[in-house]
């Protein structure tokens, strides 16, 4: 299987003319929050938001800011908290000079945990705001609609 994938990938590269200048290294955003709060877990989180703002201003790419929570409160509360966290980061980006049309936000509540919520460490890592980056406003809108549909039935269910 690996050989097929590798040869397919090599074929695609040789059929397509790609230049190093056509590629952009995307800056990650992963901001952690204190439990039951819209307060950053520590001061380094503000620096991360500032660096992401510079990235968006420089590249003119689009982003959705996604808020997530642990499962330590009722699902409806967590959904609202995740939305508030994402809005905080989005507003910070706009206040740092990012065009408001470039960045949107949405909350996921506890619907998409990456770590085990039954451990303190896992729950802390699930209290995060991340960003997904897109080339155009159309790609961004399509992604948001897709994610809204995906979580519509699970965002208020306890995980």
Image: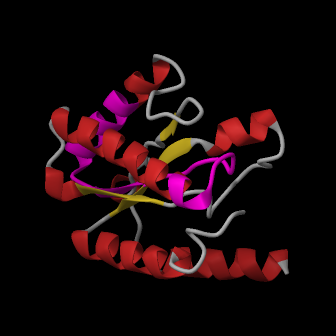
Residue 34, by quadrant, is top right
The quarter in which the N terminus is drawn is: bottom right
Residue 115 point in image, percent of width and height: 75, 49
Most foreground residue, 62 or 106: 106
Rendered location of residue 36, percent (x, y):
55, 36
Q: Is residue 58 visible?
A: no
Q: Which residues are magenta?
A: 49-77
Position of residue 137 relative to residue 22, above or below, is below
Left-right relation of 47 to 152: left
Residue 106 visible, this angle: yes
**Magenta stretch contains residue 75:** yes
The verdict on residue 114 being magenta is: no
- Residue 67: x and y in percent read 47, 51
Residue name at image x 44 percent, y 75 percent: 148
- Position of 105 with respect to 33 (left or right) is left
Give the residue displayed 62% in from the left and 64% down from the top: 111
The residue lying furthest to the top in this view is: 43
Q: Is residue 52 left or right of residue 136?
A: right
Is 6 on the left or on the right of 21, as rendered? right
- Return the x and y of residue 86 as percentages of the image width and height: 39, 48
Quadrant where the C terminus sits is bottom right
Looking at the picture, tell me which residue is in the foreground, 66 or 75.
75
Residue sitting at x 68%, y 36%: 124
Location of residue 107 by image quarter: bottom left
Q: Residue at x 47, y 74 (%)?
A: 147
Count the labels in the image.
0
Q: How is the image coloured?
A: secondary structure
């Amino acid at each position: 299987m690996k050989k097929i994938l590798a040869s397919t990938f090599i074929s695609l590269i040789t059929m397509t003319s790609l230049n190093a200048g056509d590629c952009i290294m995307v800056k990650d955003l992963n901001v952690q929050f204190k439990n039951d709060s819209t307060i950053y877990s520590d001061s380094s989180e503000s620096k991360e938001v500032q660096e992401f703002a510079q990235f968006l201003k420089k590249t003119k790419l689009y982003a959705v800011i996604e808020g997530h929570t642990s499962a330590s409160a009722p699902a409806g509360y967590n959904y609202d908290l995740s939305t508030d966290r994402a809005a905080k980061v989005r507003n910070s980006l706009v206040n740092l000079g990012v065009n408001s049309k470039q960045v949107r936000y949405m909350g996921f509540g506890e619907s998409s945990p990456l770590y085990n919520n039954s451990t303190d460490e896992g729950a802390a890592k699930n209290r995060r705001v991340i960003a997904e980056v897109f080339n155009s406003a159309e790609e961004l809108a399509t992604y948001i609609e897709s994610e809204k549909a995906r979580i519509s039935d699970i965002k208020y269910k306890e995980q």
